[in-house]
Amino acid sequence: MLPFIKALWGPKAIHRLDMAMGTVVTQLVHGKGAREAVEATAKELRRLEKLLSFHDPDSDINKINASAGLKPTSVHPDVISALNIALRVSELSLGAFDVTVGPLVRLWDFRSRHPTLPDIGDIEAGLALVDYTSIDMTAEPPMVYVSSPGQSIDLGGVAKGHVTDRMGQVLGAHGVRSACLNLGGNVLVIGVKPDGKLWEVGLQHPAGEQGKYFAVVLAADKSIVTSGVYERYFEFAGEKYHHIIDPRTGWPAESGVFSATIVGESSALADAVATAVLVMGLEQGIELVRRLGLEAVVVTADNRIYATDGLADAIHFVQGLSPCLI
Ligand code: AMP
Ligand code: MG
């Protein structure tokens, strides 16, 4: 999704748009040195996309997957950082988020022009390969091993968040104090707007048109990350099949949650947790959010909106939609 971002266009604002990681990446950066900073973040984006992609045969992730059950693979430390967060959320969500969901993701090929439903036998075989506990890794030297042939890591649920964090660090190193990054729904706001007011990040309604938002979150120095069933899906025989897979069934998650927005410091953590909540459902999802000290806005299939009480002052609902604070 592309949340609506209301920004004030100052004289020194640099706006840049890239297509990367299967999504639209926008950057709005204010202040002196913004142009150099944005060039550096665009470079960082390309570097990390190459490293973390599930589809690029030369990515570190594909090297690990090609060596599953054979030998450990040397990787860039970025892979270890992203995997650390992914594994933490895999554990805390009791496998609702599972970074070894690769074999199932491949079966549900959302990139195909003419997607079809996977074969039931293939789903059974895929399910047997999903197990995040079979990852062995060391940080020094950075190496990763997955224990059985056919297993595969897919960082799709956390990679955009990790890249957003890194791009934020690059902006920080260039002295940027006011910026807004959006990687297809992974939003990071740095500082406040040049007019000193908080950034306003619009949340898209999962049942609405693209660009229609139901709430605005006011934030400074925060990540605001949304996962939704409407982000990527295909239709087959009149049914919609979305891209977040329940690792217990092998089918698109049917938890009763249509979208989850997580607000926190780390974009990678918020990204993984947003995906986890789509699989875990409202109650267990919110429990995980609380445990990690994060905040959330959840829209359920019955069109109710829930927000954690820490957001009470930071969220504004549009057109009289009233949330349940939990
Ligand atoms: P996001 O857009 O962050 O919610 O991530 C969705 C992507 O995460 C999918 O396109 C898959 O690549 C991957 N994915 C799907 N289901 C899961 C899952 N249960 N656990 C971890 N990653 C998943
Ligand atoms: Mg995610």
Image: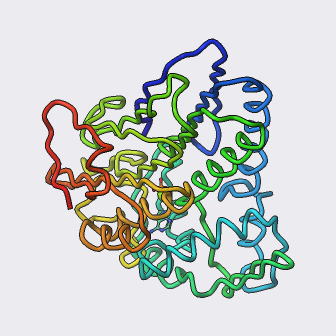
The coloring applied to the image is: rainbow
Give the camera-side residue of 251 and 16.
16
Percent of width and height locating residue 307: 25, 54
Residue in the picture at 62% in, 45% down: 21
Q: Is residue 167 above or below residue 265?
A: above
Q: Position of residue 219 (x, y in %)?
A: 43, 41
Q: Quadrant of residue 29?
A: top right
| Left or right: where 56 falls relative to 154 | right
* Residue occupying image coordinates x 42% and y 67%: 293
Q: Quadrant of the N terminus?
A: top left
Please identify the quarter of the rendering in which residue 257 is found.
bottom left
From what the image shows, is residue 35 above or below residue 227? above
Q: Position of residue 4 (x, y in %)?
A: 40, 30
Up/down of 96 relative to 253, above or below: below
Examine the image and state in which quarter residue 43 appears.
Answer: top right
Near-viewer residue (57 or 315): 315
